[in-house]
Image (tube, rainbow, N blue to C red):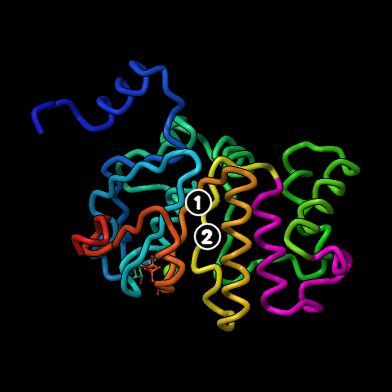
Amino acid sequence: MSDARPEESRTRTAAADLGARPTALEAVDLCRSFRLGDGSELRVLEGVNVGVEHGEVVAVVGQSGTGKSTLLHVLGGLDRPTSGIVRVGGADLSGLGSGQMARVRNQHVGFVFQFHHLLREFTALENVAVPALIGGADPEEANERARRLLEAVGLAPRLNHKPWQLSGGEQQRVAVARALANHPTVLLADEPSGNLDRRTSDELHDLLFELREERELTMVLVTHNLELADRADRTLHLADGVLRPSDDA
Ligand SMILES: Nc1ncnc2c1ncn2[C@@H]1O[C@H](COP(=O)(O)OP(=O)(O)OP(=O)(O)O)[C@@H](O)[C@H]1O
Ligand SMILES: [Mg+2]
């Protein structure tokens, strides 16, 4: 590469030159290490570079323990990198305090976890309404938005069920609806179908791709499911702390 400027500055200038919409999600030289009890350092991410365009679906694959969840957490502002930069919708997360970070997560990032993390005492409708309420929507509007999202994921007849009154697949669909509550810039999903049977996981994948068409969703999907990875626009492989196109793996 002949341009000696850091990737970060090149990307920014290129975007400015073209008057382009900023990349939906971007990581530059992202590192994340953990300090262990014995004082040693476990280096998990060692210079991840990735840019995800608006409307793009990227699958991240890699062996267990390579750092996929760690990466997703850092990309979504749930965790902070040891060094490097994350930009969501062009906004650099580095300098943000925890309140501002929470606001970025609420407004711009939707998470679907492997285990849905729904609030047990809340109904499906309430679970999906929570992010909008936190974002300042009035309760009526939040409930209406939640109802429409639950209808979109096929759960109109289950609005008032609590998570434990729903099947595993239904719980994951509630989690998808919740993740979309504030029209996020990016949807980050960590093995969203990891606990589902084949048919239910196929249905969940269909749902994600339908939503992608309808809402031009940008998604990063961590998965061990190669069929799901095949449906993505791009598959990246996480190994030895870096992301590479999966063909090079
Ligand atoms: N808070 C932490 N403190 C210390 N080590 C951690 C911490 N979080 C994760 N790790 C370690 O970092 C490595 C990556 O963990 P991570 O959960 O990101 O892996 P993964 O690729 O998501 O694996 P899986 O496919 O099993 O979900 C693991 O070896 C894990 O033990
Ligand atoms: Mg994981």
Residue type indicated by callout 1: Met
Q: Which residue is mark 1?
A: 219
Which label sits in the foreground, 2 or 1? 1
Q: Position of residue 73 (x, y in %)?
A: 46, 55
SS label for mark 2: strand
**Stretch in magenta:** 155-181
211 w.r.t. 138: above or below:
below
Query: To which quarter of the image does residue 7 belong?
Result: top left
Q: Position of residue 149 (x, y in %)?
A: 76, 53
The foreground one among 60 and 128 is 60
The foreground one among 85 and 206 is 206
- Name the residue rendered at 66%, 42% in the picture: 183
- Name the residue rendered at 28%, 45% in the picture: 49
SS label for mark 1: strand
Q: Which residue is mark 2?
A: 189
Quadrant that contains the N terminus: top left
Residue type indicated by callout 2: Ala
Going by the image, does 5 lie left or right of 158? left
Query: To which quarter of the image does residue 108 belong?
Result: top right
159 w.r.t. 56: above or below:
below
Quadrant that contains the C terminus: bottom left
Question: Is 172 part of what is drawn in magenta?
Answer: yes
- Name the residue rendered at 49%, 69% in the picture: 191
